[in-house]
Amino acid sequence: MSFKKYQLLLILSLVFLMSCGSKNDKKIAQVTEKDSIQVYQPNWESIKKHYKDPEWFNNQKFGIFIHWGVYAVPAFGSEWYPRNMYMDENRLSATLRVEREGPTEEYKHHVKTYGNPKEFGYKDFIPMFKAEKFNAAEWIDLFKKSGAKYVVPVADHHDGFAMYKSNTTRWNSVNMGPKRDILGELFKEGRSKGMIMGASSHYAFNWSFFNKKDTFDTVDPENADLYSKKGKDPKEPVSEEFKKLWWNRTVDLIDNYQPDILWFDFMLDMPAFKEYRPKLAAYYYNKGIEWGKEVVLQDKNFDHDAFPEGTVIYDLERGKLPGIRALPWQTDTSIGKNSWCHVSNWESKTANQLIDDLVDIVSKNGNLLLNVGPKADGTIPDDQKDILLEIGDWLSTNGDAIYNTKYWKVFGEGPTEVGTGHHSEGGNKEFTGQDIRFTQKDGKLYAIMMAWPKNNKVSIKSVKKAEDAVSKVKMLGSDADIKWSQDDTGLHVEMPQQKPGKHAFVLEITL
């Protein structure tokens, strides 16, 4: 059943009840709005029966992720500084596997710069997180200029500090630090400017994020509601108390901010949260019906069976898919090569790399969620701004080949292969002029060349005359007449003398 049908049924039900007359007034009063919209039940059979990926999300193609929190104060290592600053013996992975022997660089840096973690712990960075230059309007204006259509700020990371007015924890940005509702300000400004607003939750990992030792402040009962109540055993299973807290915190976020997109990090996929996953999906999707809008739930599905196929929108961290996926999906990656949050040694990717990533992902029916890492004072560094504006310039010329498009019969052609799966982007090579990606819309086929072809000529083998007869070819951003011919070996194009830009180049082909 479609979303519009749900709304129609609700309206018809109310009309029917109202038509029954005053004798039923008492009965009508007992039928609350909440009772009337429980379309989804907290089980996968019900969710799979009713759920359909919202088409609006698939049309947007490009969004902005924001990793900003207390961890931007030390600006060292990554957003995992709060975990690694307490690793004085071994560095542990999220699965509690020893990644490296000996103290971490974060621990050594912390001791040298701030002192003993028992005397100056992560909590002591919070008063230093002032966000004194944060301006939601400036951020949203920048994101709009980048060509992004949706924005997903981190609502709370593994560190447990909420970037919003929380009703479940005192450790939030209204009570402490900035003394402002960061998420609320961004939501208000973004929605006033026509942006789709989402939020991400990473809180589930808070249970085992901090190392608990007597030599750290993480064992102080006064701080247990920040560092979690887990004991010193690193393998202690997630308590029912913590899972209920996670649930209440998530419901609080959903109810009070009504996010269009709700994104979750990896720990939700773990067995400890198995019973909460269908409960979450049903609650959020029912809320969407109550709000009168289709909402998007996103998950990494690290466990592969955590969310059944077709119940959420699949998300890949710093990686891509090898080919077309008929269902919508998304890559989340950062402008930063080495971090998601601002760090003093931040290394930015190039605009060219990120535009190529966007094109490759969209050709395979995906979206790109691109992360920025603001400084603790609330400013976005100039190099990140420049990259976003460069992407926006490209999209202002070539957006017809990206927004509201569908995948073609093949995603592309060319010699360069991309790494696939989570955390695979590090091995990717630069695309060449022989690498072409396809999208389509309104009877137009877009052939996007990832680089300018050698000798100003390109042959597109996938567009053969017998299969796809071409009537017209033009280049977006150029007024030049394009010389072309087509035969059974493909479409052969002579490029204009003047390049219309610096990055990927788009041929609009009328079939």
Image: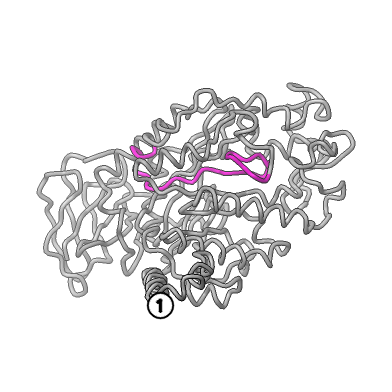
Q: How many dots with numbers?
A: 1
Image location of residue 427, percent across then percent down: 53, 49
Task: List the single residue furthest toward the right.
Answer: 214
Image location of residue 393, percent across then percent down: 29, 38
- Is residue 391 among the parts visible in the rendering? no
Q: SS at mark 1? A: loop
- Is 293 in the magenta? no
Q: Is residue 138 left or right of residue 238?
A: left
| Foreground pick, 262 / 244 | 244
Q: Name the residue tied to disc 1.
A: 20
What secondary structure do most residues of the magenta stretch adopt?
A: loop
Amino acid at the residue labelled 1? Cys
Reply above or below: 258 against 396.
below
- Is 157 in the magenta? yes
Q: Residue at x 76, y 42 (%)?
A: 225
- Is residue 269 among the parts visible in the rendering? yes
